[in-house]
Amino acid sequence: MINNQNLFQTIKDNSEKLLGSFSMELFSIFMSGYKHAQLDFGNQSEEISGIPIEFHQWVCQKLKVKNKNLSWAITITLFSATEIEAFDLFINLFSEFSCSYKQLSKGRQEQEYSNKLSKRNLEDLITEIKFQPAIYLRIWSISRMYAFLNGYLKACEDFNFCEEIKIELNNFDLWLGKEIERKTYIYPKCSWHKMLLLFYPDEKTALEQFFIYYDKYCELSAKKVDEK
């Protein structure tokens, strides 16, 4: 099992690369992607690493918060002056929570998620997010999409799941850069989500365009395979 504290510190130290920018909300979306990958690829030999669903209720009780509609990330952020202070508070709370928390049984985990998730490649995963964004991202946001996919890829890397998924996303990243260069004559030297934020007015529009670009990329890739 991956040590959660080490994972959290790795994310904080590499927040620009993994999250795009540091915030507790993007951190929570990243962790959601990290957990989804383990469930998708059947991490059955060891406990699921990440943040259990019980943590949200525990945080509300611990901080005596009555509005349980707020995510644990927003709740902790509201109790802090800065995002860094929020992260430090999260670490302290999660450490206390972990001492008294008994990990969900494997059978319960499989029962809870087996009917929801069965993704095995990047195209299937992105298609599922496209039609059910609220389940994965909560709101339409290209930054959240970036954090979620990076969390998913990080779990694939940590648990040696599916190397092809990382290769697929890297190929799309390069292709998108060339598409934008073809239109603007400038190759943007930044991550794919920032490429889209540069040319579209808001997070929602950028995410909508991401799906359009990705569909086009998949169509062109399929044609190349057929030609071979």
Image (cartoon, helix red, strand yellow):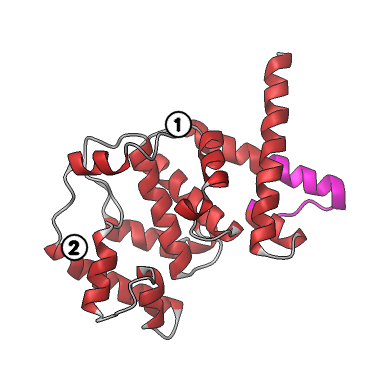
Callout 1: helix, strand or loop? loop
**Is residue 76 left or right of 167 when viewed as pictured?**
left
Vertical order, 143 against 66 (above or below): above
Q: Position of residue 209 (x, y in %)?
A: 70, 50
Please report the residue visible at 55 percent of the width from the left and 41 percent of the height from the top: 126
Residue extending furthest top?
228
Residue corresponding to mark 1: 120
First-in-chain label (1 vs 2): 2
Q: What residue would you read off at disc 2?
A: 98
Q: Main secondary structure of the magenta part?
A: helix
**Which marked residue is nearer to the observer: mark 1 or mark 2?**
1
Query: Which amino acid, mark 2?
Result: Ser
Residue 185 in sight in this render: no
Q: Residue at x 44, y 46 (%)?
A: 152
* Front residue (pair 176, 35): 35
Image quarter where the C terminus lies is top right
In the picture provided, is 180 more to the left or to the right than 155?
right
